[in-house]
Image (cartoon, helix red, strand yellow):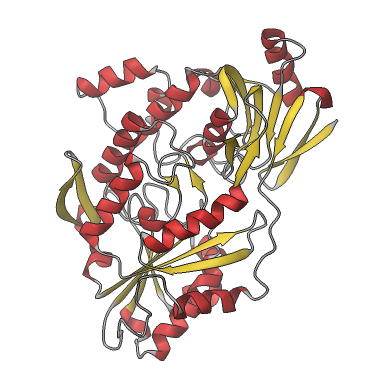
Amino acid sequence: MPVKLPYGNSEIEFDIDSNRVSDLLTPSEVVPAKNPLFEVERALETPLEGPTIEDLAPRGKTVAIAVDDITRTTPTNLLLPPILDKLKSSGTSKDDIKVLVALGTHRRMTEREMKEKYGAEIVEDYEFVNHDFDDETQLMYLGDIAGEVPVWINKAFLKADIRIVTGNVIPHFNAGWGAGAKILLPGLAGEETVGRMHVYSAMTTPNGLGMEENPTRKLIDAFAEKVKIHLLINSVITRYREIIKVYAGHFVKAHRIGVQHAKQVYGVPMRELADITISSSHPADIEYWQGLKGLFSADLSTKVEGGIIEATPCPEGIAVMHPKWIEYLQYGTEELKEMYRTGEIEDFVAFGLALNVAHVREKHPVCIISDGISEKQAEKMRFQKFGQIEEAVDMLTRRYGSDSKINILTHGGEIYPVSK
């Protein structure tokens, strides 16, 4: 049977024996909201255990709005206009509003990218600031959480009288689900904070995909309690990036209700764990720093010691901002933990993600199909690179047998395979 998978802005096609396919898993088809802007306005007017913008009395106050970057699928261009209109009608001056791009440790966005994601007119009319995680002059320290995780937060966000956060609820291998307070940690946190969070996550829950409550999410919420969020606005969208519903209000309450809705779209039941899983990392495919998400969803759909084949284009390579990552990826879990104990780590963020990957890699041989990752790089990452999916399937079939079962994930970057 012919199968097409999303691959960057195009598709990758291959043939597979239909008798071997256990499940072709894809996000559910859901009817979007008829009027997305009205849906955002409805959420702002009826927040869940939180204030309306009018309740916050923004007249004469400074406002900071946290938005995520191009590595996230949040329809921010639809969320921002109603938020800004509400602020304006409540008496807020345009000069008192600052939009902070919550990059975490990602690269800065270009002006063109910002106009595409947030809307050209809004970018031209309002002040947008790319968060700089390693510039201590932009950060403020608020103490520690979970023992050794320091709370370094963007100073401009903290000093604003009113702090508003946005985001989109999809599965995430560290936090369980995206959005919520995750826009602050790692989004607007300092380098050490983000690094320690990733180490904490890898040490406690190597793959927390789909877990509504897990140690990393509790850490993120504790961080937000220190910083204080006045209003959250989160979307739940279809696989085609259309708004289904928007949740506003308290940063925990509104987020968790959004998670229950998102599970109906991205939590996909499967018949069984497969011997082999083929996963497209779509839509997380700019660099492997994002593309690895397809690995963690595949982990949940594959038997222990079963094989994973991941297709991820990675036009910007492995990790633009974290060159040390590929060095850490050469090691196994115990070697990495020993390096941590002996203080040999320079980039804690890259180390944490390397430890996450190592946990999955020690359960599954990983094959990769990627235009942006060379064979030499794949070898360093302890992956085996192939030019075509069929070649990888043939290799794994020799290992598991001609009757071995296969699961296929069309949107591995945002799907949550649920075992019956």
Q: Nearer the viewer, residue 156 or 215?
A: 215
Q: Is residue 17 visible?
A: no
The answer to whether 248 appears left or right of 278 in the picture is left
**Residue 377 on image: x %, y %:** 52, 23
Q: Is residue 263 above or below residue 393?
A: below
Q: Is residue 78 above or below residue 219?
A: below
Q: How many marks?
A: 0
User: Residue at the right extreme?
Assistant: 1
**Residue 265 on image: x %, y %:** 62, 52
Q: Classify residue 54 by image quadrant.
A: bottom left
Query: Quadrant of the image for the N terminus?
Result: top right
Q: Residue at x 41, y 48 (%)?
A: 106
The answer to whether 293 appears left or right of 350 in the picture is right
Q: Classify residue 7 by image quadrant.
A: top right
Q: Classify residue 306 by image quadrant.
A: top right
Q: Nearer the viewer, residue 150 or 47?
A: 47
Q: Is residue 62 visible?
A: yes
Query: Quadrant of the image for the C terminus?
Result: top right
**Residue 28 on image: x %, y %:** 68, 50
Q: Nearer the viewer, residue 360 or 252?
A: 252
